[in-house]
Amino acid sequence: MTTHYRDDQIVVTSAYLRINDRTWQLSELDYVWHRQITPDWRVRGRTASRGVLNVLMILAGFAGAAVLIAVLSSAYIELKITPVPKNTLIVVAILLLIMGFVPLIWEWALTRVDNSYDKGDAIYEMWATVHGTQILLLRLPDATRFSRIYRGLQRALEEAES
């Protein structure tokens, strides 16, 4: 028996499909198909948060440019007054300390954006005809996980047919 997909809730093998506590033999599945349905508030929230993160990252770039210009102009003005721009050097030291955390924050934000694209913008359903009755096997808001499960089931069904 070959396992085509396995996680905490779903197992697809060459003999059966188990989703949570329900199990079907592959020979019981007459026809299997999938469809996308309109997203619910969780999926729309994921899309909205992706947009907010994108806007914040763009604004952070503009804010960084504005701070750089402000520090350079402050240093120029302070150099005209005193030979060593002490206040500007303190500000630069503080900014460098803060900039040490910027890569961590950007990595977190970019990972969140990437994951939201991977999960998709819809809800995905897997249906099957079992003994003449259409039943909903699975409903997921995660496109990547859904496609792995569905492809595993396709391979198992193809293997069972041959």
Image: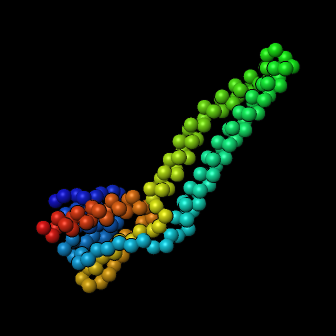
**What residue do we see at 19% from left, 63% from top?**
14
| Percent of width and height locating residue 90 | 75, 24
State the residue lying farthest toward the top.
Answer: 83
Left or right: 90 in relation to 142: right
Q: Quadrant of the N terminus?
A: bottom left
Number of residue marks: 0
State the residue lying farthest toward the left.
Answer: 162
| Percent of width and height locating residue 17 | 26, 67
Colour scheme in the image?
rainbow
Q: Is residue 33 above or below residue 106?
A: below
Q: Is residue 42 above or below residue 89?
A: below
Left or right: 20 in relation to 89: left
- 128 or 35, which is in the foreground? 35
* Quadrant of the image occupied by residue 12: bottom left
State the residue lying farthest toward the bottom.
Answer: 132
* Quadrant of the image occupied by residue 6: bottom left
| Percent of width and height locating residue 11 | 28, 61
Does residue 29 appear in this view?
yes
**What residue do we see at 42% from left, 71% from top?**
36
**What residue do we see at 79% from left, 24% from top?**
76
- 145 or 114, which is in the foreground? 114
Does residue 15 appear in this view?
no
Q: Quadrant of the C terminus?
A: bottom left
**What residue do we see at 41% from left, 68% from top?**
124
- 89 or 16, which is in the foreground? 89
State the residue lying farthest toward the right.
Answer: 81
* Quadrant of the image occupied by residue 142: bottom left
Q: Is residue 68 above or below residue 3?
A: above
